[in-house]
Amino acid sequence: MFKQMREALNISKSTDILDYIHSLPQPAQDEAQTAIRAIERAAMVEQEPQPGLNELISYLESRGIRMGLCTRNFDAPVTHLLQSFLPGKTFFPIITREFRPPKPDPAGILHIAQAWGLEDGAESLIMVGDSVDDMVAGYKAGAATVLLSCEEKEELERHEYTGFSVRRLDELVEILEEGFEEREKQ
């Protein structure tokens, strides 16, 4: 999907998609937003939940653990995910790319901490994500970070901002039960 977005915008892999779009003048900015939203809408039809998603969410709910979302997607794919795979589950707040600045800036995660009235900023949060933007945002907010990894992301497992990595979301259940400990920060 990101490759398609970059092709539609005619930008390189090293160029941040959202930063590029926000740098455009109007009406080019709106046209670029429309182009990537169309790609996201097409991709959401193929969307599948990550393995272990429902088990993790059930565990968190059973413990009364609050859940928020911080994503670089726009609202339609997020709504589709929640309605299709997590109906009736409560996520608050939901931070989409309309929130500025987007990840990798920590502002979205800090906003969640503030909405929850946390006095330690984001230090009592765990940011679970699948990208370097997620790890950077979580780390810079002061949250613990967990990478949902796969073969293509093994290098990111060793990234200085990745505190822990799992291959399935339900692996977090046992980790949380036994006591979550990130690897030593460098």
Image (cartoon, grey):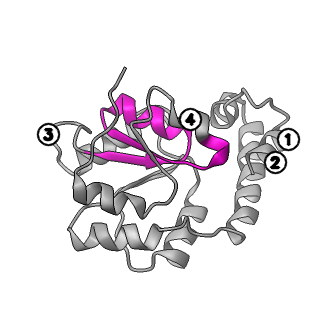
- How far is mark 1 from mark 2, CA to CA? 5 Å
Q: Position of residue 114 (x, y in %)?
A: 24, 44
Left or right of 146 on screen, residue 143: left
**Which circle, 4 or 3, is nearer the viewer?**
4
Say if 141 sits above or below 76 in the image. above
Q: Are marks 4 and 1 in contact (CB under 8 Å)?
A: no
Part of the protein shown in magenta: 125-153
* Residue indicated by mark 3: 119
Crowd class of label 4 (few under 14; some 14 to 19; many from 20; radius 10 Å):
some
* Residue indicated by mark 1: 7
**Which of the two discs, 1 and 3, labels the residue nearer the N terminus?**
1
- How far is mark 4 from mark 1, CA to CA? 24 Å
- How far is mark 1 from mark 3, CA to CA? 43 Å
* Residue indicated by mark 2: 4
Q: Going 79% across and 39% down the picture, which residue do you hit?
A: 6
In the rendered structure, does residue 95 fall within the stretch colored magenta? Answer: no
Task: Decide which of 56, 24 is in the foreground and name it.
Answer: 56
* Residue indicated by mark 4: 156
Left or right of 112 on screen, residue 76: right
SS at badge 3: loop
Callout 4, which amino acid?
Answer: Leu
Q: Position of residue 132 (x, y in %)?
A: 55, 35
Q: Are marks 4 and 3 in contact (CB under 8 Å)?
A: no
Callout 1, which amino acid?
Answer: Glu
SS at badge 1: helix
**Which of the two discs, 4 and 2, labels the residue nearer the N terminus?**
2
